[in-house]
Amino acid sequence: MSVNIKDICWLAGLLEGEGCFIISKNKTPRIQLGMCDLDVVEHAAKLLGGVTIYTAKTIVDRKTFYVLQLGGSKAIGWMMTIYQFMGERRKTKIKEILSVWKQTRSTRIRKMGETCSRGHLLTSASTYLTSTTNTLSCRDCRRINNKAGKTRRREKFLLKKVG
Ligand SMILES: [Zn+2]
């Protein structure tokens, strides 16, 4: 889904009112939105991309609540996108999350050493956070692994054909 400036403004307004910007204990940045209006949450999920919605019940009147959660680099990307439209309180929070995230990232890179096990130079641009395990990985290695996987699959396919 292509997102235009109107969508971004709409999202910013919605998140200003109903959203939550968090950085969890294991330093994963997160955007959360919880509302009783499914259509609104669904629209937000579509714009944010690749988000699943789960339901929860409100404690007081047991109303169904629709919650979406976006984490990792995607959440960071969106925080940066909507930053200029947010009020002071949210801006401060986003800045705080961004600085913790940057710090964690560079600490992780330092811990990994300057290069990966294959010898690729590690920078914040050459690494990415895996969304499932939230660990830092090397982009060059991913490219190599993907290629190797493709070659293996191709070989398997050809072997099958040969019988
Ligand atoms: Zn590597």
Image (tube, helix red, strand yellow):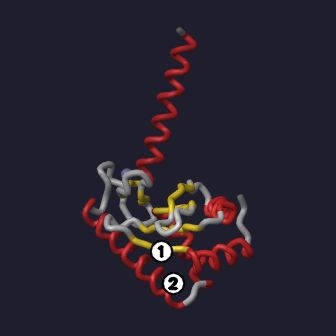
Q: Nearer the viewer, residue 1 or 42?
A: 42
Q: Quadrant of residue 161?
A: top right
Using residue 49 as the reference point, say whether residue 108 is left or right of it: left
Residue behind mark 1 = 21
Residue found at x 39% / y 54%:
138
Using residue 114 as the reference point, say whether residue 21 is left or right of it: right
Where is 46 relative to 98, above or below? above
Query: Which residue type carries mark 2?
Result: Arg
Local crowd size for mark 2, using a 10 Å CA cut-off: few (<14), some (14–19), many (≥20): some
Residue found at x 44% / y 52%:
140
Residue behind mark 2 = 90
Q: Nearer the viewer, residue 135 or 9?
A: 9
Local crowd size for mark 1, using a 10 Å CA cut-off: few (<14), some (14–19), many (≥20): many
Using residue 44 as the reference point, say whether residue 24 is left or right of it: left
Say what secondary structure mark 1 lies in.
strand
Residue found at x 49% / y 39%:
147
| Residue 57 x %, y % | 51, 61
| Residue 12 x %, y % | 63, 77
Query: Which residue type carries mark 1?
Result: Phe
Q: Nearer the viewer, residue 120 or 39?
A: 39
* Residue 83, disc: none
